Amino acid sequence: MGREGRVGNRQLEGARGMLAVAAAAILVLVCGCGKSDKGTNPWPPAGSTGELEPNDAAPQNLGVLGTADLVVAGTIASASDVDQFAITLTQTTNLGVQISWSGSSDLDVGVMNPSGIMVNFQDTGANPEHCTLPELGPGIFTVRATAKSASGQKYVLTLGPR
Ligand SMILES: [Ca+2]
Ligand SMILES: [Ca+2]
């Protein structure tokens, strides 16, 4: 009986220890959430689509653009990285395009029509780079994010009707 009692106590202590670890883990998680809420823009943004390489030659298909914005969280690995995204416009659309980032990189964004002709290229030093292209489509358009200078630069690309 005595031995069983000691074993029981050990098990109880073990359970208490695990509870303490679990409580500490929850505390860390809660602290992590609190930190990210203090004025910094979280990346990737909630609800965003992650960029999928390779997309330099064949664009990543984002599907049909509806009434809601499409938000992509991407990374320009280097100045030679080209990120392309295809969107399908099912009707004539005033297309808003914006790329934003944190840091000193110089990113640009362009839009190509279904024939592959660049109809707009935002190539200034501004951050964000943005434009609204009136009366595009219907058809499949390609949005192209590039950089004059970048190294592992995270960005947010927002596409939507305006
Ligand atoms: Ca990329
Ligand atoms: Ca790429």
Image: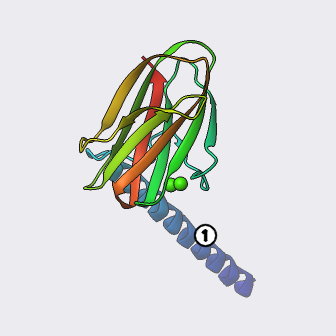
Q: Secondary structure at mark 1?
A: helix
Residue 65 lies in what quarter of the image?
A: top right
Q: Find residue 142 and report its horizontal and vertical position in percent.
A: 55, 35
Q: Position of residue 29 (x, y in %)?
A: 44, 56
User: Which of the 4 image quarters holds residue 99?
Assistant: top left
Which residue bears the numbered disc 1? 15
Give whichever of 138, 9 is nearer the camera.
138
Left or right: 131, with 55 as reference point: left
Ligand 1 is within 8 Å of the C-beta of the residue at disc 1: no
From what the image shows, is residue 59 above or below residue 87?
Answer: below
Q: Considering only vertical position in the picture, is 48 above or below 139?
A: below
State the image quarter where residue 125 is shown: top left
Q: Quadrant of the N terminus?
A: bottom right
Query: Residue at left 30%, top 38%?
Result: 128
Judge from the rendering whether residue 156 lies leftward or rightward of residue 143; answer left or right.
Answer: left
Q: Residue at x 49, y 52 (%)?
A: 82
Residue drawn at x 42%, y 42% is 156
- Quarter of the image containing the C terminus? top left
Nearer the observer, 74 or 82? 82
Q: Position of residue 95 (x, y in %)?
A: 46, 22
The kind of residue on which mark 1 rests is: Ala
